[in-house]
Image (spheres, rainbow, N blue to C red):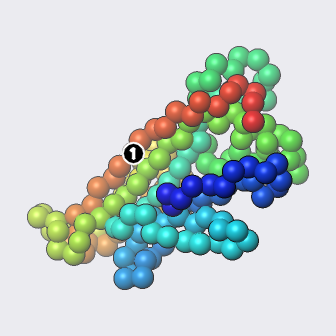
């Protein structure tokens, strides 16, 4: 949300949390929101208005259980739920430590009547591309009715400089 984090004290409360999600704003328009912990309470603030879809895939380096061959280059892009190993917290933590990049997809919309070519029927949008859509992730394919709004899918990848095998 653009606010600074307090200096670390060495306690469990030193962790900073920013949770990004799409939610209707006060005016009813969908927006990319940021929820963060402010002391012992959570605060949610809008970041960008007009965001209808927000998807993240995690680029994992060598996520097949091998201990060698990690080169800091993602081998697979997975949903957060795919990083969880049921009943095995250590394996789940190891998967998260292997995240080397984030692939972010957005679907943004303009104001009412902003589309020049007005389609008579709706369309399905894929914020991360049709190849990354999954029935297990309802936000990966968004069926939108024709409403006269201009829409654009945007995608980008962010490389993380995580230390191999580090925290």
Res 5 visible: yes
**Secondary structure under the numbered disc 1 in the rendered image:** strand
Name the spot of residue 53 as percent of width and height, x first.
43, 61
Point 57% across, 34% down: residue: 160
Name the spot of residue 15 as percent of width and height, x first.
72, 53
Q: Is residue 160 left or right of residue 37?
A: left
Quadrant hosting residue 141: bottom left
Residue on which disc 1 sits: 155
Name the spot of residue 78 as percent of width and height, x first.
61, 43
Asked if 44 appears above or below 88 in the picture, the reply is: below
Quadrant hosting residue 93: top right
Res 121 visible: no
Q: Is residue 128 left or right of residue 61?
A: left
Asked if 16 appears above or below 96 in the picture, the reply is: below
All told, the count of numbered labels is 1
- Residue 76 versus residue 33: which sits nearer the camera? 33
Point 49% across, 37% down: residue: 158
Q: Residue furthest bottom?
A: 27
Q: Is residue 12 left or right of residue 6?
A: right
Q: Is residue 132 left or right of residue 18?
A: left
Point 75% across, 30% down: residue: 166
Asked if 142 appears above or below 71 in the picture, the reply is: below
Point 30% across, 65% down: residue: 109
Are there few (<14), some (14-19), or many (20+) residues within 10 Å of tag 1? some
- Residue 59 versus residue 16: which sits nearer the camera? 16
């Amino acid at each position: 949300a653009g606010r600074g984090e307090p200096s670390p004290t060495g306690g469990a409360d030193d962790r900073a949390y920013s949770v990004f999600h799409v939610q209707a704003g006060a005016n009813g328009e969908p927006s990319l929101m940021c929820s963060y912990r402010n002391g012992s309470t959570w605060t949610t603030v809008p970041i960008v208005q007009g965001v209808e879809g927000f998807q993240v895939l995690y680029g994992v380096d060598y996520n097949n259980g091998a201990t060698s061959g990690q080169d800091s280059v993602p081998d697979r892009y997975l949903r957060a739920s795919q990083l969880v190993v049921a009943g095995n917290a250590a394996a789940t933590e190891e998967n998260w430590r292997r995240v080397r990049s984030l692939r972010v997809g957005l679907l943004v919309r303009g104001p009412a009547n902003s589309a020049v070519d007005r389609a008579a029927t709706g369309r399905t949008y894929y914020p991360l591309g049709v190849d990354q859509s999954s029935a297990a992730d309802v936000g990966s394919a968004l069926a939108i009715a024709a409403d006269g709004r201009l829409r654009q899918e945007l995608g980008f990848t962010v490389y993380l400089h995580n230390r191999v095998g580090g925290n």
